Image (cartoon, coloured by chain):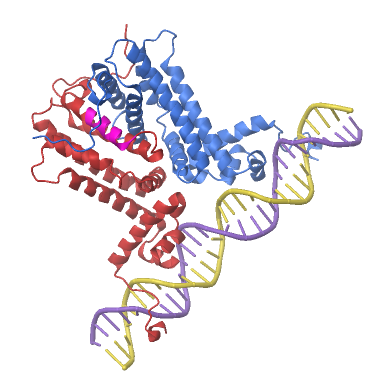
Chain colours: A blue, B red, C yellow, D purple
DNA sequence: AGCGTAATTGATCGATCGTACAGGAGCAAG
DNA sequence: CTTGCTCCTGTACGATCGATCAATTACGCT
């Protein structure tokens, strides 16, 4: 019918292309509407398709959400990795500086990005599917940090340190600053966040973090210390 | 009718008492059911009251949620402050250690607490009411940290440092570690998180953080440094 | 003891949710 | 041009949501 008018009612796409478009629409819907954007109706409206199409390409809603989570996480990691190593022969310490700058760039600090992230996080506790995505992507993220820090550790510019806890600490510092900047951008400026991280890396190089040093493994003190 | 049987159908409470009970029920509901716990029906079921009662004591749902947010935040802050200064004459450095230990105690690290927190956070972007509560409570939280760090700064045990960015950095480190521990408790142990924070404070005392030093105010570098 | 106040109940409203499903339609192959 | 695959549409259904409101009832006060 409609084809007789020369105006098709809709476009047919291959399954792969349509799946990608729906994932992108999911992220856009979450950006705009926050938690209420995680609805089949909102997503289909943003994507410009009918309600039923989503359940044709994704068996359930949570499957689509999980796919969107993984897509966003991997995309951000790719961005960070690319910016950290622009040239082939960037020295290790500067790669980290580039990574820090990219972490607090305007595209990462957009409040919408954070809102999407929050929606995903809030689903982890109750959805094993989301937990699986989180564990997988977060392991990757820490691996990237361990790579960056590992190159620094072997460059001779720094006192030798233990890689794993150092990556954990730096990722926590990055996440904490990123979250606070996203929640209330007026509290401090992105440049301050970068400076705080740079200071941390410099202190790591100087061997200022006793528990992270590699030369003498020591047990961790869990009780408050006694300063007399 | 029911009173004739000697079995009252319900208890009458003063407005203040009932409001407090409803706030507590809200937090319990959010702990159990996550984001879906933020529903009038769930909350009233947890509180053991009827659906309509909530709208009798709170004009709208978001008013109740905001009250619960403020209640939880202030309660946690009170707990932390009390544990940080157990004795009157606890030295500044040990107060901080106590604060760190309390921050990663089992009651703060319960996954349910984090889930409640996430629900609140996800509402900040779209609800000015929640944003107001967040700004207020987070300012208080940073003030507590500034008090603790300020006492350390004046004790003479540390190189003089700028209070505000130091509090921002420490709170970010605390938050980041707390979040990661809550999201996936198996990644590292609470004792490691405490050690990372202790290291940070020690490095602060040693003057290892250049941008935080007080003696010479310097501009913050926002471009990646050039290591040649 | 009875009365009045206000705390409490529960049915009800319109809206929105996720999923299922039957039929319409684009597009390539024959 | 016709056929057929499957991508796609849109209605339908049952459940749940926040908010309203008239009716009910506990409990202090006189």
List x then y, in percent, for residue A47.
60, 37
Q: Residue furthest top?
A: B228
Between C25 and B209, the one nearer to me in the picture: B209
Residue A53 falls left or right of residue B5? right
Q: Is residue B164 above or below residue B139?
A: above
Principal SS element in the magenta part? Answer: helix
Residue A114 falls left or right of residue A201? right
* Residue at 43% in and 18% down: A83
Give the residues drawn in magenta, as a range: B189-199
The C terminus of chain A - image quarter? top left
Residue A179 visible in this rendered orientation of the protein: yes
Residue C6 falls left or right of residue A16? left
List x then y, in percent, for residue A85.
43, 14
Q: Quadrant of residue B84?
A: top left
Q: Is residue B145 above or below residue D20?
A: above
List x then y, in percent, for residue A114.
42, 36
Q: Is residue B36 above or below residue B51?
A: above
Residue A30 visible in this rendered orientation of the protein: no
């Amino acid at each position: 019918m409609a084809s007789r008018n020369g105006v098709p009612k809709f476009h047919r796409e291959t399954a792969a292309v349509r799946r990608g478009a729906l994932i992108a629409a999911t992220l856009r819907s979450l950006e705009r509407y926050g938690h209420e954007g995680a609805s089949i109706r909102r997503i289909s409206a943003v994507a410009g398709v009918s309600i039923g199409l989503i359940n044709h390409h994704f068996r359930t809603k949570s499957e689509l959400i999980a796919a969107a989570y993984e897509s966003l996480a991997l995309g951000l990691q790719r961005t960070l990795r690319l910016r950290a190593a622009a040239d082939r022969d960037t020295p290790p310490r500067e790669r980290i500086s580039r990574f820090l700058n990219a972490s607090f760039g305007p595209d990462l600090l957009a409040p919408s990005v954070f809102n999407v992230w929050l929606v995903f996080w809030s689903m982890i506790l109750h959805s094993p599917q989301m937990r699986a995505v989180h564990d997988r992507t977060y392991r990757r993220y820490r691996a990237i940090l361990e790579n960056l820090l590992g190159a620094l550790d072997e460059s001779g510019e720094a006192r030798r340190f233990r890689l794993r806890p150092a990556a954990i600490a730096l990722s926590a510092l990055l996440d904490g600053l990123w979250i606070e900047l996203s929640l209330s951008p007026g509290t401090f400026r992105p440049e301050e966040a970068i400076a705080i991280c740079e200071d941390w890396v410099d202190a790591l190089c100087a061997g200022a973090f006793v528990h992270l040093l590699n030369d003498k493994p020591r047990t961790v003190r869990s009780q408050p210390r006694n300063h007399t």
